[in-house]
Amino acid sequence: MRTAEDTNTAAGPLPLAGLTVIDLTRVLAGPVCTQMLADLGARVIKVEQPGRGDDARAVGPFVDGVSAYFMSVNRNKESIALDLKDAYDRAIFERLLARADVLVENYRPGTMEKLGYGWDVLHARFPRLVFTSVSGFGQTGPYSGFPAYDMVVQAMSGMMSVTGQEGGGPCRVGVSIGDLGAGLYAVIGTQSALMQRASTGQGSRVDVSMLDCQVALLENAVARYGAEGRVPGPIGSRHPSMAPFDVFRAQDGWFVIAVGSDAAFATLCTLLESPALAQDERFATSRARVAHHAPLKALLEERLAARPRAHWLQLLADHGIPCGEYQTVAEVVRHPQIAARGMLTQVRTPCGTPLQVSGNPLRAGQGDVVRRDPPALDADRERILRDIAAP
């Protein structure tokens, strides 16, 4: 296992080196935020419940009895187990806060106040501390105190209503975008607060709502409803305002063609040796092509079926038509572009068994992002206690 004493050790200087983050988060949204901060060089001290730790430690699949789910979002962190209802452990926690730059938590609103660590209390005691909270619905509003998981905010935000095949029922996005989006927005908010502190000397509260983040990610759907007054629904893989912009079947498999202009469509028709399509009034403009997307797709696939996918990908790419192969996860992890960009890395269990996980896109191509493997529960207690005892 990687056991470097300095969590900021890397091939070169990292942008958040020298910052300390106290991590009270668990499961996914919060740990995504704190892992990103750790990847960028911050020292992240994960404070976990004694005997149990982060709830994600009990979520499968498992490698050597250790949760792969937990390991995928907790690299480069240290762990200490503290009971925040115990007087002795609270004293340790408060000594940690006194040395910290950031506190990140994703409890339900009101929990930190019940523990005696609400924003007003902490800001009075530690005025430079940035306090980032991630919750389902934020710190204000009529739903503030309600519990939430990714599925809840995907449903409530309208995200599920625009996902899936046309005519199908409600469909969840295939990854936990509710958690992931909130985690990434929390990183942006935290770093913005740190920038503000550099000029004011004061920490601030960062309030991130999972539901807010999902609404922000709806982009085109909200604008389309505002412009047209029509409720967007699921349309499969195609684009609502550009065509052909979809997944197409070639002779031996699926691939994507994404045409964003009339000129590009004319080029595509030439490459497919189907110039008549560009002259067809049904396909003369982007708006017309969207209105007649079904017959257009059928005609294109008739031509695409004549040659294998690799032929079309090469031909279209050579002439500036955006395209890409449809891939499974197994194919993605073997793709040379992913390898070249350093977007896969390995973490290890306490027994030393490796697990392949995604890397950090903000450090792609700059060497291995993993400086410390995901910690066992309370693994760093002695070091952390030694550090806070030092003058």
Image (cartoon, rainbow, N blue to C red):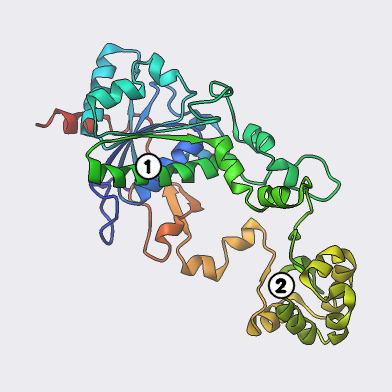
Q: Is residue 131 above or below residue 219?
A: above
Q: Is residue 97 left or right of residue 47?
A: left
Q: Are marks 1 and 2 in contact (CB under 8 Å)?
A: no
Can you say which quadrant of the picture contains the C terminus? top left
Q: Residue at x 48, y 42 (%)?
A: 183
Q: Residue at x 72, y 48 (%)?
A: 225
Q: Nearer the viewer, residue 174 or 369?
A: 174
What amino acid does circle 2 point to?
Answer: Val
What amino acid does circle 1 point to?
Answer: Thr
Q: Is residue 230 above or below residue 344?
A: above
Mark found first going from the N terminus, 1 or 2: 1
Q: Which mark is residue 259?
A: 2
Q: Is residue 216 left or right of residue 30?
A: right
For residue 148, what is the image quadrant? top right
Q: Is residue 253 visible?
A: no
* Residue, disc 1: 190
- Spot occupied by residue 49 in the image (x, y as percentages of width and height): 40, 22
Q: Nearer the viewer, residue 227 or 292?
A: 227
- Spot occupied by residue 366 in the image (x, y as percentages of width and height): 37, 64
- Spot occupied by residue 358 in the image (x, y as percentages of width and height): 50, 53
Q: Is residue 241 left or right of residue 387?
A: right
For residue 349, what is the image quadrant? top left
